[in-house]
Amino acid sequence: MVLKEEMSENDKKFAEMLEKYEKLAFSVCYKMTGNYFDAEDMTQETFLSVYKSLESFDGNNPGGFITRIAVNKCLDYLKRAEKRIVPVEDEVLVQNASCVPPPEHEMIQNETRHQLLVVCGGLKPPYNEVATQYYCNGKTAAQIADSSGKKLKTVQTQIRRAKEMLQKKIRKEDLV
Amino acid sequence: MHITKEQLNHYISDRMTQIEQLNFLEHISKCEFCAGKLADAMLKKELVFTPPDLKDNILEQTVYKKTTTPVKLPQEIVMARVRKKQREFWMYTAKVAFAVCAAVTMIMMPVGTLPGSSDGNYKESRLSLTKEITEEEARNNVKILDLFRNTSAKISDDVSKALNLYKK
Ligand SMILES: [Zn+2]
């Protein structure tokens, strides 16, 4: 690990932006892709791009800077995957327009957690256990390695494999 | 034309048609001002929890990745390091060659000339292990086996070390 003092000014700036806007970028990506695991990939791509274009960033409106990149990445992804933004039926829209929108912040959190529990639990061992610990219980790979006595590298590989399986699974379900 | 407050609200509360959404997002992908508006609107609601290691994974691919690549060193230091590595590599090669020679010599040696075997015939000397042998003979036989085992372990160790050095 690199100490903060050894970081360049740019790196420090980047680390601070990541700390502050990781959740924002992820939420934008999640809203656009509708897939938790694809949102993870898109958030990574977004910040890699942010890192590369940091020199040209004037420091104003960092939220806008990051969000614009995230939206770009997700639009590319949606086109690439020939995925369409979840179509909303016009009739449903008319009906919904008249009612008060649900308090969706909590709903999104709970719904996401519930969905994650279901899909992670549906994997075969040992991936179900690792994925549930990581995605649903918020345990880091290091913590999982610690508590299970597995090697960190093993846990990281299992998380990566689990994620690949989950991505495929969710994309398939989307098609149905 | 920038996005309106109404559009923003509709996007946030999922009340846009597919085409409206696309137009809205296409504009945001080109306009940092409006992207900032979307960011503010998103930040007002509870954001989705992220995977635990996402931040670390991103740092590893950016900040940490760069600092692990060697800093540019003066030419003479680089050359000195290269020469040292080369010397180390040849030292290991010589050691390995020696170990191989030693092992080959031992294998070629008639068993009878090794201490502890009473018979020139290897097969018979092995058989004699199961028969009655003196305590000293048994000890010597164990020593020979150990010597073989150590030598072969040393060879494979040296070979892998040399390969590692060479890869570097
Ligand atoms: Zn605009």
Image (cartoon, coloured by chain):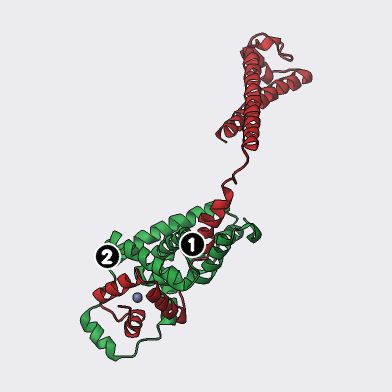
Chain colours: A green, B red
Residue B147 is marked as: none
Label 1 within 8 A of ligand 1 by Cβ: no
Residue at 39% across, 61% down? A166
The correct choice, above or below, for B145 with respect to A144 in the image is above
Where residue A89 sits, quadrant-wise, is bottom left
- Quadrant where the N terminus of chain A sits is bottom right
As shown in the figure, which amino acid type bears the numbered disc 1? Leu
Picture mark count: 2
Within 10 angstroms of label 2, few (less than 14), some, or many (20 or more) residues? few
Residue A70: give x, y in percent of width and height. 40, 67
- The answer for how far apart the CA atoms under marks 1 and 2 are is 38 Å
- Of residues A124 and A98, the one drawn nearer to the viewer in this rendering: A98
Q: Give the chain letter at badge 1.
A: A
Under circle 2, the secondary element is: helix
- Circle 1 sits in a helix, a strand or a loop, which is it? helix
Q: Name the residue carrying label 2.
A: A175
Res B32 → quadrant: bottom left
Q: Chain of mark 2?
A: A
Q: Which residue is mark 1?
A: A54
- Pick the quarter of the image with the C terminus of chain A: bottom left
Q: Position of residue B35 (x, y in %)?
A: 39, 74
Q: Amino acid at mark 2?
A: Leu
Camera-nearest residue between B54 and B100: B54
In this image, A56 relative to B23: left or right? right
> Residue at image x 39%, y 58%?
A165
| Left or right, residue B114 beside residue B165 | right
The residue depicted at 65 percent of the width and 33 percent of the height is: B80
Q: Nearer the viewer, mark 1 or mark 2?
A: 1
Q: Position of residue A144 (x, y in %)?
A: 56, 60
Looking at the image, the residue that sits furthest to the left is A91
Q: Which residue extends farthest right?
A: B136
Residue A110 seen in render: no
